[in-house]
Amino acid sequence: MSQLPALDRQTLETLGEELSNPAGALEFAQVFVQMLPQRIDAVESAFAARAADDAVVALLSLNASAAMVGACRLAAESSTALQLIGEPSEHAPEIARLRSHATDFQSALGGIIL
């Protein structure tokens, strides 16, 4: 996973082109960052409650948005987490990785927003 970039700038630029609004793509990415703690908390809560449907919804939402803004590591990790649904394993390490990738993305995004 570490081979993937925290932020794929080309994906974010493509989003800006598709929206015909590069600034709008950056705003979307910023809102995504603001919502990350809540989204990851929702995943954690669903795993803790063994609520598979809720975990799937939370992870798919996180995955789709991460992919849209170019948060490659976060998108890949959320895909990995989807495979863990229903597994009796401890999910704390997975949540920690999601939080770490979220922080990496936020840092990378901050590096391109002036």
Image: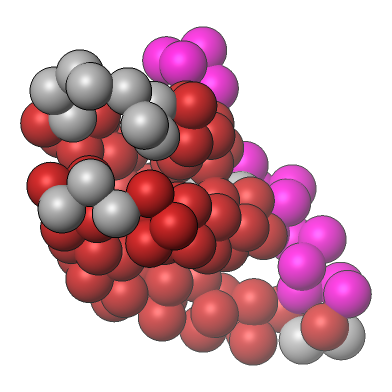
Q: Is residue 15 magenta?
A: yes
Q: Is residue 111 among what the camera can see? A: no
Query: What residue is at 76 percent from the left and 73 percent from the top?
Result: 16
Residue 112 in the image: x percent, y percent?
A: 47, 58
Residue at 41%, 80% in the rendered image: 31
- Taking 31 as reference, is 12 above or below it? above
94 lies above or below 24:
above
x 63%, y 51%: residue:
67
Q: Specify whether 81 is left or right of 13.
A: left
**Vertical comparison of 10 with 112: above or below:** above
Q: Return the residue nearer the eye: 44 or 37.
A: 44
Q: Quadrant of residue 2?
A: top left
- How many marks the image carries: the answer is 0
Q: Which quadrant holds the C terminus?
A: bottom left
Q: Is residue 88 visible?
A: yes
Q: Foreground residue, 77 or 28? A: 77
Q: What's drawn in magenta, residue-wise?
A: 1-18
Q: Nearer the viewer, residue 22 or 65?
A: 65
x%, y% of residue 100?
21, 37
Does 54 sit above or below residue 98? below
Q: How is the image coloured?
A: secondary structure
Q: Is residue 36 magenta?
A: no
Q: Is residue 112 left or right of residue 60?
A: left
In the picture, measured across the screen, residue 48 lies left or right of residue 42, that is left
Q: Position of residue 65 (x, y in %)?
A: 57, 63
Q: What x and y, as percent, mark residue 15?
A: 77, 67
**Residue occupying image coordinates x 29% and y 54%:** 51
Q: Is residue 4 left or right of residue 25?
A: left
